[in-house]
């Protein structure tokens, strides 16, 4: 993220106030510096979506990804977005609400721009790709930061590796993850003290392995 | 005879009255294949619309339609809010600042309303939604040549269209989660569309 740029925010639109607040809570926990605005339930506390509440939530964020639960929440969110002065500052994202919000929040926390935050959320909806162990060079790296490959470290790793022309697989125990997928990296569950095996193929495979080792040596800038 | 802002407002009041008197029927229909709030949602919305009109009728038909749209969008809460809201919003936009609406403008308004519902909800005829009532209504309205005739034709087509939803399996909206079990019930939104268009036809817009 370049200096002075605000992090992309998140708006969670749900039929239920508690669901919206809960999703915002779970996503926010992974992304302390990201504004996650919840808009759930009707004005009188019932089940439904409230245009005015969604509009207020949109006003609390700048650039933002908007996630929703059921179809009618999408329609209300669309209307609220259309009535913004600058509708292009937000993107409506069709993604599973909880996973999408977490993936988007982590990406936003890592400084990703709006398009990248939106695509992180969308990717959370697809089946986690079973990364075929890439053949080629392989290194073993011990994680020395406390939370390991979680939240911000996972986001930083994915972003760094996605800039390289290499296909990277990170393995921990019997699980393996595509090195460019935040959620897959997090799903490895590798914590501080754990050792992961990183393999890479492709033109910049050496750079990718070095980049991963550097990040781990720097404790992922934690 | 054409309709002024005043007669559009009267038509909307007639719709509010018919929604209020069929509230329980719409609730029952929605309870069968949805969450049972359609009658409540629409009644809340139209009650707020009448309250807004009581503050004073806007100057043009477009302004009345826009007030209806923004009130329904704010107050309805369920899928019907953004759908009817978009319908009235598009109708308002298409009649611009005309002081009176003749048959051509009313047809254009109905077409725009249908276009708005389809754009918002992505439903097609046969998906068991309000589109099944509104789409044939627009079609029927095109072949009449006075406002009152076209509203009567639209209402009749909407009524038949709503009934045609009974055997259908829902492919859009909350009812679609029921799959085959949604068959055998009239779609609440199609029914409310028929009721509202019926009230326009029977109301003071002549
Ligand atoms: N995608 C859609 N396109 C068109 N109409 C829809 C769509 N989704 C729902 N509807 C209509 O909305 C009606 C339900 O409205 P309502 O009960 O107010 O909303 P909710 O389903 O959110 O409870 C349905 O009977 C159907 O006619
Ligand atoms: Mg309902």
Image: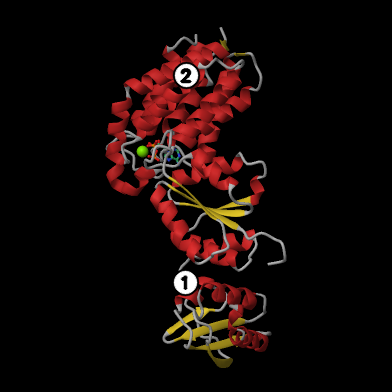
Using the numbered discs, state the Cα–Cα distance from disc 1 to disc 2 in whole angstroms.
51 Å
Residue B110 coordinates in the image, percent (x, y): 53, 25
Disc 2 sits on a residue from what chain? B
Identify which residue is drawn at 38% across, 27% down: B43
Identify which residue is drawn at 44% across, 57% down: A23
Q: Where does label 2 land, which residue?
A: B12
Label 1 or label 2, whichever lies nearer to me, is: 2
B132 and B75: which is toward the camera: B75
Q: Quick one: label 1, few (<14), some, or many (20+) residues within 10 Å? A: some
A83 and A6: which is toward the camera: A6
Disc 1 sits on a residue from what chain? A
Return the mark for residue A128: 1
Viewed as shown, does residue A10 lie left or right of A188?
right
> Where is B102 relative to A1, above or below?
above
User: In this orientation, does residue A34 appear?
Assistant: yes
- The answer to whether mark 1 is within 8 Å of ligand 1 is no
Q: Where is the N terminus of chain A found, in terms of image quarters? A: bottom right
> Where is B98 relative to A161, above or below?
above
Residue A161 coordinates in the image, percent (x, y): 62, 78
Kindly state the secondary structure of the residue where label 1 is placed: loop
> Where is A171 relative to B144, above or below?
below
Residue B189 coordinates in the image, percent (x, y): 39, 33
């Amino acid at each position: 993220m370049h200096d002075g740029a605000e992090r992309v925010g998140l708006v969670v639109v749900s039929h239920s106030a508690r669901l919206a607040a809960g999703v915002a809570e779970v996503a926010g926990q992974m992304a302390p510096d990201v504004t996650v605005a919840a808009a759930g339930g009707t004005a009188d506390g019932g089940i439904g979506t409230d245009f005015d509440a969604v509009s207020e939530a949109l006003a609390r964020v700048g650039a933002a990804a908007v996630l929703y639960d059921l179809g009618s929440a999408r329609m209300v969110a669309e209307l609220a977005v259309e009535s913004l002065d600058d509708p292009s500052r937000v993107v409506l994202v069709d993604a599973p609400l909880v996973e999408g919000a977490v993936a988007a929040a982590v990406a936003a926390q890592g400084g990703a721009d709006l398009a990248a935050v939106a695509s992180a959320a969308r990717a959370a909806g697809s089946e986690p790709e079973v990364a075929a162990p890439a053949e080629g060079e392989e290194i073993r790296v011990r994680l020395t930061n406390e939370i390991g490959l979680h939240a911000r470290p996972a986001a930083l790793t994915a972003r760094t590796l996605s800039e390289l022309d290499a296909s990277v697989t990170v393995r921990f125990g019997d699980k393996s993850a595509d090195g460019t997928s935040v959620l897959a990296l997090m799903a490895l569950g590798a914590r501080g003290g754990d050792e992961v095996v990183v393999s890479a193929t492709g033109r910049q495979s050496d750079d990718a392995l070095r980049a991963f080792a550097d990040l781990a040596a720097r404790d992922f800038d934690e | 005879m054409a309709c002024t802002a005043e007669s559009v407002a009267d038509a909307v009041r007639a719709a509010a009255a018919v929604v209020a008197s069929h509230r329980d029927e719409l609730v029952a229909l929605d309870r069968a294949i949805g969450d049972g709030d359609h009658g409540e949602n629409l009644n809340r919305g139209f009650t707020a619309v009448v309250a807004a009109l009581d503050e004073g009728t806007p100057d043009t038909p477009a302004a009345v339609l826009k007030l209806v749209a923004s009130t329904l969008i704010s107050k309805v809460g369920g899928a019907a809010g953004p759908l009817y809201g978009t319908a009235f919003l598009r109708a308002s936009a298409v009649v611009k600042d005309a002081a009176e609406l003749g048959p051509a403008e009313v047809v254009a308004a109905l077409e725009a309303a249908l276009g708005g519902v389809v754009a918002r909800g992505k439903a097609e005829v046969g998906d068991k939604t309000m589109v099944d009532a509104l789409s044939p209504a627009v079609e029927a309205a095109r072949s009449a040549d006075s406002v009152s005739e076209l509203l009567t034709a639209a209402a009749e087509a909407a009524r038949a269209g709503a009934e045609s939803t009974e055997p259908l399996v829902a492919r859009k909206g909350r009812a679609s989660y029921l799959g085959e079990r949604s068959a055998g019930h009239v779609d609440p939104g199609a029914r409310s569309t028929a009721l509202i268009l019926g009230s326009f036809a029977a109301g003071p817009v002549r």
